[in-house]
Image (spheres, rainbow, N blue to C red):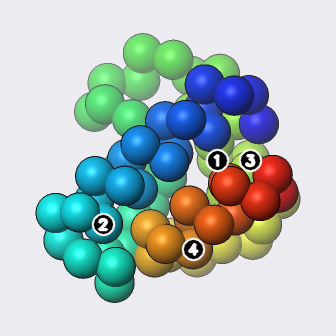
Amino acid sequence: MRESLKRKFIDVCDKKIASKGPEVGLSFYAFFANKNDDPELLMEAATWWIMTHRLDHFEKATKIKALVGSGS
């Protein structure tokens, strides 16, 4: 996963955790605007989420942050 996407995942997770608490769930769509303005980046996130880690549609932000931070 490219570094800019990692930073984006961590930033969004941090903001969601701060506003809604450690139990907040996210889908990979939470990291993108409602417009599909960067399809390659969206596919990279989807591949990491679905194919690499086989995550459910919604996962806890703390889990996503830990996975991204571990370099997985």
Q: Residue at x 41, y 24 (%)?
A: 36
Q: Residue 16 vs residue 42: left or right? A: left
- The Cα–Cα distance between marks 2 and 3, rounded to whole angstroms, is 24 Å
**Residue beneath disc 4:** 63
Circles 3 and 1 in contact, beta carbons < 8 Å: yes
Between marks 2 and 3 in the image, the one whose residue lies nearer the viewer: 2
**Residue beneath disc 2:** 17
Query: Element under label 2?
Result: helix
Mark 2 or 3, nearer chain start: 2
Q: Residue 34 vs residue 10: left or right? A: left
Task: Decide: is 3 above or below 45.
Answer: above
- The Cα–Cα distance between marks 1 and 4, rounded to whole angstroms, is 16 Å
Q: Residue at x 28, y 52 (%)?
A: 15
Query: Element under label 1?
Result: helix
**Residue beneath disc 3:** 47
Residue 65 position in % (x across, y down):
56, 61
What label does residue 46 carry, if any?
A: 1
What label does residue 14 carry, if any?
A: none
Query: Element under label 4?
Result: helix
